[in-house]
Amino acid sequence: MKSKVYFTSFRTNPELNQIQKLEKLVKAAGIETIDFKDKFTAIKMHCGEPGNMAYLRPNYSATIVKIIKELGGKPFLTDSNTLYTGKRNNAIEHMDSAMGNGYSPLSIGTQFIVADGLKGLDYIEIPVDGQYCPAPKIGSAIAEADAIVSISHVKGHEMSGFGGALKNLGMGSGSVAGKKEMHCSSKPYINQDNCRSCGMCAKNCSQHAIIFTPGHKAFINKEICIGCGQCVATCQFEAAVADRDEQLNILNCKIAEYAKAVVKDKPNFHIAIIMDVSPECDCWCYNDVPVIPNIGMAASFDPVALDCACCDLVNNTPILTNSNTVTDRYVKETCVCDKDHWKLIHPDTNWQAGVEHGEKIGLGTREYELITIE
């Protein structure tokens, strides 16, 4: 049976603005059918790394907070600490980053809580009998929530291909130990022919796993590397690359299993915002020109169907001709609608492995019916 995915464009008028359209969308998609009464409701989102301007404005989260409060729920915004260096790898800096990007109690109407605690050590194992992760390590605040609502920013990703609902739920809810479990099989390598010895990969490696050979070429120590992919996104010369084998497929499968753990036995609902579709994740302290024009917003009870619908919407939209990463990954002449844009941006990745595995483990279905809300 096809899952229903509801969609609305960003076209507005004086009587119906974007926020009003979001409220109309989620209500049409059925969010009011969930019994939120007195339920602690985790709104899983991403506040954006400081310096990144592609992250979602807090207005979207504030709208969902308002709706859940009106339905009697106790909503809170949440995310887990990062595995890599940056301003969100501990709760203090993470909360400061959220506040700096506008996610304050005054603007969103509730608190932002770091799910896995001060140092990312607070988690609960949730058994799902996964093929790769039997008991995902989910941040405690998310694991203890009574209901889950996710708000995802659709964008590219250097390891998973693209980031949507599954990535937001799975990787984003995993504790530091959980993120290590997901990344452990996806370790990149250095194509030394492309290495310019700039040192950016080593500078951004949280594990100090990158050294330089006597010939001044970068080298990754796989014994230390945790596979976070930060070097892949940092390298401007396509020297740090993901292995061209099943490792990245396994990463996406693990993310799906973690996402299943997050929503297990809980009412859940999912929203995706397809705007400022940057080639890299919002975890970076910068963002490049969007890949495509802004499209709209989508919502569903099925995170797998939602991801599939978002990818189809993106792939059916021509690439912006001024959308070039510094490494020139795009081919500007390929501004047609019959291509997989995520593969064009990150050719070593396979985003479809995640939704395929998500369907296999019963998280949702790839078959969907797109229902447009004006």
Image: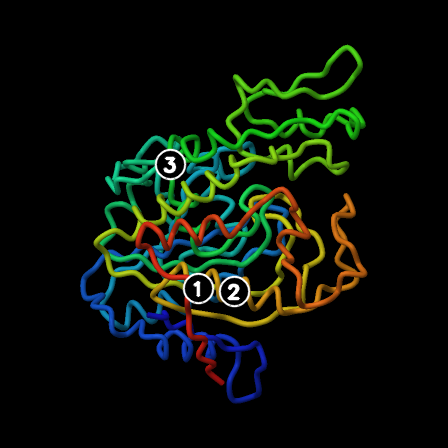
Q: Residues within 10 Å of mark 3 (few under 14, many from 20)?
A: many
**Residue 204, horizontal then vertical, whole percent:** 63, 30
Q: Nearer the viewer, mark 3 or mark 2?
A: 2
Q: Is residue 190 left or right of residue 225?
A: right
Q: Amino acid at mark 2?
A: Cys
Element marked by disc 2: helix
**Residue displayed at 66% across by 24% down:** 202
Element marked by disc 3: loop
Q: Amino acid at mark 3?
A: Ser
Residue 175, label in figure: 3
Residue where numbered disc 2 is placed: 310
Element marked by disc 1: helix
Q: Is residue 95 left or right of residue 87?
A: left
Measure how far apart labels 1 and 2 are at the Cα level: 6 Å
**Residue displayed at 20% across by 68% down:** 35
Residue 340, label in figure: none
Tell me: residue 363, above or below residue 191.
Answer: below
Query: Which quadrant of the view contains residue 314?
Result: bottom right
Quadrant of the frame with the N terminus: bottom left
Measure how far apart labels 3 and 2 are at the Cα level: 26 Å
Q: Are marks 1 and 2 in contact (CB under 8 Å)?
A: yes
